[in-house]
Structures are given as C-alpha cells and as structure tokens.
Image (spheres, grey):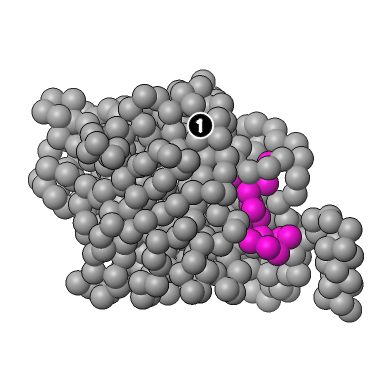
C-alpha cells in the first residue's frame, strides 16, 4: 500500500512538474531551492541514500620538484530500513567504502587501496559538520577554517592541510544537479574547485618529503542517479593555470551516446559560475587496455566547449582502480595534463571513467 501511494504521488508529480520528496524506497530526493546551511551541509545527510566526499590533487615536492597526484574518496551508502534483529548496540544501516590512490610521476607508479566497513566504530561521518573517517583515513573541517586530510596506500602516507581559494560552488539549477530523466535522478553537488594544499608524503622508500599544490573537493548528496539505460560516466575536474576551473560529466547511454543530462561548467578564479552548458563534445583520441581487467578505457580525450579545445592526457596510462572488496568494480581515475590545441600545457585535471566493461563510446556530435 505504501508503494502504491508513492506511485500515485510520482505520477501526480510528473503531471504537475513537481519533484517527488522521496524515492520509492523512502529516501529523500534532491529538490530545487534547498536552503544550504554551513557547516551543517558539509556533514552527513542520513536521510539520503548515497553520499560521497571526494578530494583529488596535484602536489609538488618542495625540495626537488617531483610531482604527485592523489585521490581520496569516502562513500556512504544506506540500505533500506528493515527491522533490526540483532544487538541494538551494533545496529547500522550505513555502509562506508573508501578509495585512495597516489600517482608518483617521477617513479611512474600508481598505488591504490580501499576500505569497506559498516558504520560505527571503524567508519562514520558526523551530522552537522564535515568529519568523516574510515579506519585511519579521514577528512575533517577545522574550526579555524580549512580542512585536515590523512590517507595511506600500502606503505605510503599523505597528510595535508587544505585551504579553499574560491567560494563554494553549487553545481546545477537551483541547487540540483540532474543526472537523468527520472525526476528523482539528481543530487546536491558542492565543490571547492581550488584548494591550497600543504603537508607531507611518506614515499615507498620510507623517506618523508614536504609537498604543496592544489586540490579539488566535491561533496555530492543523492538518492538516485544512474538509470537502467545509462552505462557509466566520464567526469573531470580541471584546474587551469589562469586560475579558472572546469567540471564536466558525460553520462553515457547503453549505446555509447551522450545522455542529454550531461553537463559542463566553467568557473572563474573566485568561484563564480561563468558558463553552464549541455552542448559540449568529447572525442576519444587514444585508448588504453588494462593488463589486469582487460578493460579498454579512453586514454587521451579532447573536450570542446564552444570553440575552446582542452586535451586531457594522462600523466600515467595505468591509473586503474581494480577493486576486490566492492564487488569487483573497476574504473579508471587519475592525474592528467590539460593541453590546448597548440600543444601547450595549460593546467592539470583528474579524470574518472566508469562503466567500461567494453569500449562503446565514440565521438559525440
């Protein structure tokens, strides 16, 4: 009966152009004109099904100029609320997964690790402010401003202080980032596209070096995103040398074509939105095949927005995260150069490529 009432409400909402408040399984939906309040909305939103805090960065060794890329992602996933039959002190419907990776450009090495824990003692996130952890990895907002980050992969460890250099950016229309035709397929999408980063990294040889650079931080809150006819997505966070930033996500349909809900955004050096458009083109210039998973991924991409061309080229081809604890999910995510059509390096990017069990994507006109 509850599900029938929800279907009636969903049909009514579609007819009258309203976004439903809840999904069929009872989780809140990202809706227009949500009143963001901070630091509250940096924290956990347990009434939404899925949430992640995602940080990537490009770092330089202060002593010798060696370069490193890193990414750290905390995922929170809620399961439908069922009656708990076990000990109440262990009750939790929240699963926390975390991925971390370090790219060492001078050593041409890519190292990654993952963690999976039920919410509680080993992993959790705070309601009302940003304080998320999974075992020894954490990301926390500091009371005096900025953020504290710690992660490790294998025998490497990274500790950073992050300070936003722009205002917080909210992607999407009226605070909602659409990901599909279903009115519930949306998210609240918050980003600091440029963050001053300083700290230290312990390298695989045991030495510790001081590093500095730029990071990018996303926080996305959702209860429903990919539809059954969508096979995956391509995403990039681009930091241009002129201080501006670009973010795009290309949602791919099962036949490899570009979903109409794909978006590209251009943000200036203060965090002001300059352009948001569905009209952009992705061209695959080269591909790479994983020797482990045998998956063929795009490698070098050409992004065209209006008449501007940005070539996204991996700093290391093998930056695939092949997962063992999260159902065997594998995807490519790594540090890249951004090059213009005159072959000048004009920035850095992190590129994420998911859903490539076979390469079906081609040029999208």
Residue at which label 1 appears: 267
The residue sitting at 26% across, 75% down in the picture is: 294
Residue in the foreground of this view, choosing between 60 and 340 = 340
Note whether residue 161 is visible: no
Name above or below for residue 76 compared with residue 36: below
**Residue 29: percent from the left, percent from the top?**
73, 56
- Helix, strand or loop at mark 1: strand
Callout 1 crowding tier (Cα within 10 Å): few <14, some 14–19, many ≥20? many
Note whether residue 66 is visible: yes
The residue sitting at 14% across, 50% down in the picture is: 108
**Residue 299: percent from the left, percent from the top?**
28, 58
11 falls in the magenta region: no
Q: In the visual, does 102 lie left or right of 197?
A: left
Quadrant assignment, res 110 = bottom left
188 falls in the magenta region: yes
The residue sitting at 36% across, 75% down in the picture is: 358
């Amino acid at each position: 009966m509850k599900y029938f009432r929800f279907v009636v409400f969903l049909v009514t909402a579609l007819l009258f152009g309203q976004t439903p408040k809840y999904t069929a399984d009872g989780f809140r939906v990202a809706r227009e004109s949500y009143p963001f309040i901070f630091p509250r909305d940096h924290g956990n939103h347990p009434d939404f099904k899925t949430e992640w805090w995602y940080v990537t960065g490009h770092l330089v060794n202060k002593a010798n100029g060696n370069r490193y890329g890193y990414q750290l992602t905390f995922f929170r996933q809620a399961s439908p609320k069922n009656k708990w039959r076990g000990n109440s002190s262990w009750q939790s419907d929240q699963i926390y997964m975390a991925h971390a990776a370090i790219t060492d450009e001078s050593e041409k090495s890519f190292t990654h690790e993952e963690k999976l824990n039920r919410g509680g003692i080993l992993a959790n996130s705070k309601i009302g402010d940003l304080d998320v952890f999974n075992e020894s990895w954490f990301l926390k907002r500091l009371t005096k401003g900025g953020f504290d980050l710690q992660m490790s992969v294998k025998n490497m460890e990274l500790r950073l202080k992050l300070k936003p250099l722009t205002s917080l950016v909210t992607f999407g229309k009226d605070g909602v980032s659409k990901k599909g035709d279903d009115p519930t397929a949306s998210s609240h999408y918050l980003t600091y596209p440029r963050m001053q980063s300083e700290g230290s990294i312990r390298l695989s040889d045991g030495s510790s070096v001081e590093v500095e650079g730029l990071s990018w931080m996303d926080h996305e809150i959702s209860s429903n995103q990919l539809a059954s006819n969508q096979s995956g997505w391509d995403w990039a966070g681009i930091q241009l040398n002129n201080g501006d930033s670009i973010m795009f996500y290309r949602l791919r349909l099962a036949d490899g074509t570009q979903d109409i809900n794909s978006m590209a955004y251009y943000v200036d050096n203060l965090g002001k939105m300059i352009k948001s458009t569905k009209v952009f083109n992705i061209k695959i210039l080269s591909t790479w095949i994983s020797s482990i998973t045998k998956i063929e991924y795009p490698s070098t991409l050409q992004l065209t927005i209006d008449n501007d061309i940005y070539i996204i080229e991996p700093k290391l081809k093998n930056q695939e995260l092949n997962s063992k604890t999260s159902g065997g999910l594998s995807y490519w995510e790594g540090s890249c150069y951004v090059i213009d059509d005159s072959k000048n390096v004009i920035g850095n990017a992190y590129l994420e490529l998911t859903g490539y069990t076979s390469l079906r994507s081609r040029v999208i006109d």
